[in-house]
Image (cartoon, rainbow, N blue to C red):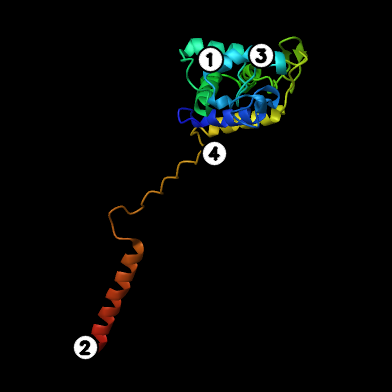
């Protein structure tokens, strides 16, 4: 994972990438990467954008890379971030671009606790079609129920993971970003010293007994 991606986002992106493209950063839609003249990660941003329409005609979609960037999405990222078309779409760039998409879907607000998991889950499902919505909602083309892809019914997309798995990884993302899952309670204060600065009662008793014994010994020795 690129070093600029924080721990919580890395947990989410590993999860998303593992669902969208289990074969990794070189994947194109339908696992047709073996038909490419060179690996996707050795192609420039402009080369991937240029090849996208042909992939759509040949394979049904332009989705490319570990996070299955659509051609329109990649064009938008290039314009928004000022990418050079000569940059390679390698693993590190893919990670950074996917992190940017996460932030655009509410990552910062979710991590800060101001965006509910259900809402964040829906927004992630709008970005990555293999993820399910976490509650019934109006989808891209029809009403969808919990566990379905936001784009269910379009004839192309479906959810590839359970909503429970998404909810679990959202919890891990938050705790993996430095917040302890179960904060340790503060240590209890020590009870106050009943005899601050003085001699303890036990020591005083022992000293008294020793003194009495010494007086008795001296008395009997004398008489």
Quarter of the figure that contains the C terminus: bottom left
Name the disc covering residue 182, or none: 4
- Badge 1 marks a residue whose secondary structure is helix
In front: label 3 or label 4? 3
Disc with the residue nearer the chain's start (2 vs 3): 3
- The relative height of residue 222 versus residue 110 in the rendered view (above or below) is below
State the residue in front, 134 or 220.
Answer: 134
Q: Is residue 220 left or right of residue 164?
A: left
Q: Residue 19: x, y in percent?
A: 66, 29
Q: Is residue 60 visible?
A: no
- The relative height of residue 18 versus residue 106 in the rendered view (above or below) is below
Residue pointed to by mark 2: 222
Q: Distance between the residues labelled 1 and 4?
A: 47 Å
Residue pointed to by mark 3: 54
Residue at x 59%, y 31% (from the top left corner): 14
Residue 202 picture quarter: bottom left
Q: Residue 122: x, y in percent?
A: 65, 18
- Badge 4 marks a residue whose secondary structure is loop
Q: Is residue 141 left or right of residue 27?
A: right
- Badge 2 marks a residue whose secondary structure is helix
């Amino acid at each position: 994972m690129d070093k600029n991606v924080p721990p919580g986002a890395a947990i989410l992106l590993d999860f998303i990438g593992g669902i969208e493209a289990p074969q990794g950063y070189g994947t194109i839609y339908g696992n047709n990467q073996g038909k490419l003249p060179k690996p996707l990660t050795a192609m420039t941003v402009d080369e991937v954008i240029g090849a996208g329409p042909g992939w759509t005609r040949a394979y049904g979609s332009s989705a490319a890379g570990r996070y299955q960037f659509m051609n329109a999405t990649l064009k938008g990222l290039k314009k928004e971030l000022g990418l050079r078309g000569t940059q390679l779409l390698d693993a590190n760039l893919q990670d950074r671009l996917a992190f940017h998409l996460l932030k655009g879907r509410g990552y910062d607000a979710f991590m800060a606790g101001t965006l509910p998991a259900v809402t964040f889950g829906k927004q992630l499902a709008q970005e990555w079609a293999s993820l399910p919505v976490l509650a019934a909602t109006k989808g891209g083309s029809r009403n969808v129920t919990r566990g379905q892809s936001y784009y269910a019914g379009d004839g192309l997309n479906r959810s590839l993971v359970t909503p429970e798995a998404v909810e679990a990884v959202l919890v891990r993302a938050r705790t993996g970003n430095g917040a302890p899952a179960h904060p340790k309670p503060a240590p209890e204060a020590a009870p106050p010293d009943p005899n601050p600065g003085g001699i303890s009662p036990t020591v005083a008793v022992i000293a008294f007994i020793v003194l009495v014994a010494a007086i008795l010994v001296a008395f009997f020795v004398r008489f």
